[in-house]
Amino acid sequence: MDQRSQWGTRAGFVLAAIGSAVGLGNIWRFPAVAYENGGGAFFIPYLFALLTAGIPILILEFTMGHKYRGSAPLTYRRMNKNVEGVGWWAVAVAFVIATYYSVIIAWAISYSFFSFNLAWGDDPTSFLVGDYLQVADPGVVGGLVPGVAIPLLVVWVIVLGILFAGVKRGLEIANRIMIPTLVIVFLIIVIRAVTLPGALTGLNAFFQPDFSEILNPSVWVAAYGQIFFSLSIAFAIMITYSSYLPRKSDITNNAFITGFSNSGFELLAGIGVFAILGFMAQTQGVAVADVVAGGVGLAFMVFPAIINEFPAFNEFFGFLFFISLVLAGFTSLISIVETYVSGLADKFQISRNKAVAIGGGLSAVVAFLFATRGGLNFLDATDYFINSFGVAFLGLVEVIIIAWVLRKLGVFKKHANEISDIQLGSWWTISLAVITPIVLGWMLISEFRINLLKLYDTDTGNYEGYPDAFIAYSGWAVAAGAIIVGIIFALIKWKKNPEEGEYDDR
């Protein structure tokens, strides 16, 4: 095996970490979450969550990767051989997310071209579900949808090409190009958005604080959830990226830059989205609350309808919006795939190119399941369960093992302080040992409670009323399967003694 790859510059690493954190969720999830949880008042629990969970976990994972110089599985193995499975579980979660995340990027590519002639017509919802995705009933796979499969192939050719080029010549260069381009494109969108009629109404709805919501526990859980899911923490990415850092690297500064840059882009996205929603509300003569949406609905149903109403240059701004989704998606996807490429290379002592071909190639093949007529249903169920019972649960296990079982926080604090300008104190320890486990535990309990309540809300008692068999194999089985895969891979013997190699074992 070659010596472990390294980032060419500190800026290269920081841009890559920011690129991983800034994804589709920043654009279509944060604005709606903030609006629904107190508007401007939401920023108080959001900032508190950033400082007590987001940045502390970023520092933890940056330190883990830097200290043990390995992928997530190798890092956990070197930390304690009995917890290697947690690293593989994180890799399995990343694998699942990569398969459907790539499909959403493919949709955005298609819509970038649809923008040239506003091909979605006067009814974007019917166009997405019927004309474009040709959605079948839940559980029905159906044939491949060419309009999705072709851009999906393009997505994987680009991603695998970047990964084949390596860390310095692939990941670093890609992020150096994509992140500044994304910021410039989105700034253009925001500048245009705030000049639209009704923009101030939308911004007022977004920023108007409802301080009564501050005392609502669900608002605080929502704040932690947004921070947790938007920073790419707890599923192997940041551990992997930081393992490529040089020995002399400022861990804490890098974490603060990454965390605040991600939040800054979320705020920018909120301004742009709500300025445009205000325009739509005024155009239709309704309240902003009547047009607020999040997720796929915001991006592929609401926004095309809004673009139709733009007073000028509809096609151009439609193209800019969907290209921003493409760029944000690519920077996150390459980081997700890198986690299992690195894990395979470490465990089985194979070349990077072979790991990209096997790991990346397999995920590309599986991704085409989501490019079928049944793809939207599979994507919806898989995304809900892997995020609710995969990422959050994984984060809880991570902090409990490190803080309470292995009691490694002191070791990691010492390592980070030795090489960083900003010194860690009791704030960091309390955040990880107490605050984060409590909040993540509460989030998981809340999710289980919500699912139990749905027993009375839908005919089947399942998420979105999906049939029992469908939700069993596309939801529960996927979340459980990630854990099982983690256990299986941890039991496989290493091709090379994982204790060999350069790392700090103090």
Image: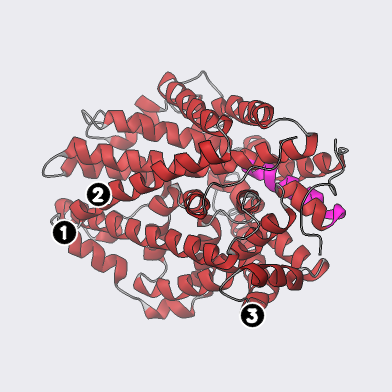
Q: Residue at x 81, y 39 (%)?
A: 489
Q: Residues within 10 Å of mark 1 (few under 14, many from 20)?
A: many
Which of discs 2 and 3 lies nearer the camera? The answer is: 3
Mark 3 residue type: Gly
Residue 125 x/y as whole percent: 33, 37
- Is residue 43 in sight in this rendering? yes
- Dot 2 or dot 3, earlier in sequence: 2
Q: Is residue 42 left or right of residue 496?
A: left
Residue 83 on the magenta segment: yes
Q: Which type of secondary structure does the marked residue at label 1 adopt? A: loop
Please state the extent of the stretch shown in magenta in the rendering: 80-94
477 is higher (above) or lower (below) than 450: above
Circle 3 Cα neighbour tier, 10 Å, few/some/many (<14 / 14–19 / ≥20): few
Q: Which residue is the site of mark 1?
A: 198
Label at residue 425: 3
Q: Amino acid at mark 1?
A: Gly
Question: Mark 3 or mark 1, which is nearer the start of the sequence?
Answer: 1
| Quadrant where the image shows the C terminus | bottom right
Question: In the image, is 429 to the left or to the right of 406?
Answer: left
Front position among marks 1 and 2: 2
> Closer to the N terminus: mark 1 or mark 2?
2
